[in-house]
Amino acid sequence: MNFDAATNMDLIDQPLLMIAGSEAGSLYMSQDAFKEADQAESRELMLIDGATHIETYWKPEYVNQAVDKLTQFFNKTLR
């Protein structure tokens, strides 16, 4: 079975926040999916400077940036 998470990104019409490391080998996938999500009510792609994909999960300096951004995003969009 094959699955592409970026398929149907154009169906997203809710606020969208994507977070990726600027040094992630998979960054191009986030950028491509972000471009396709052009129907989102609002959208943002946050790049964590210097982080690889895996580091965004465990390095405190990167995790803290992601959590701060998620907090801002949810405070703004879930009211």
Image: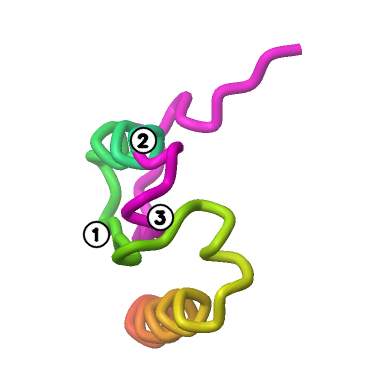
Instruction: Identify the residue shown where x is 54% and y is 32%.
Output: 5
Q: What stretch is highlighted in magenta?
A: 1-27
How busy is the neighbourhood of tag 1: few (under 14 within 10 Å), some, or many (20 plus)? few
Q: Are marks 1 and 2 in contact (CB under 8 Å)?
A: no
Q: Please, what is the three-letter code of the amino acid marked with disc 1?
A: Ser
What's the distance in space between the residues labelled 1 and 2, CA to CA?
Answer: 14 Å
Look at the image and tell me in which quarter the C terminus lies.
Answer: bottom left
What's the distance in space between the residues labelled 1 and 3, CA to CA?
Answer: 17 Å
Relative horizontal placement of residue 66, taking residue 13 as reference (left or right): right
Q: Are marks 2 and 3 in contact (CB under 8 Å)?
A: no
How busy is the neighbourhood of tag 2: few (under 14 within 10 Å), some, or many (20 plus)? some
Chain-order first, disc 1 or disc 2: 2
Residue 44 against residue 76 in the figure, above or below: above
Colouring scheme applied when the structure was drawn: rainbow
Instruction: Identify the residue shown where x is 29% and y is 49%.
Output: 40
Disc 3 element: strand
Q: Please, what is the three-letter code of the amino acid marked with disc 2?
A: Ala
Nearer to us of marks 1 and 2 is 2
Q: Reply yes or no: does residue 6 show up in magenta.
A: yes
Decide which of 32, 36 is in the foreground and name it: 32
Disc 1 element: loop
Residue 16 in the image: state x and y as whole percent. 36, 57
Instruction: Identify the residue shown where x is 49% and y is 81%.
Output: 67
Residue behind mark 2: 33
Q: Residue 20 carries which label?
A: 3
Instruction: Identify the residue shown where x is 32% and y is 54%.
Output: 22
Nearer to us of marks 1 and 3 is 3
Residue behind mark 1: 42
Q: Please, what is the three-letter code of the amino acid marked with disc 3?
A: Ala
Residue 44 in the image: state x and y as whole percent. 26, 59
Decide which of 33, 57 is in the foreground and name it: 57
Decide which of 67, 17 is in the foreground and name it: 67
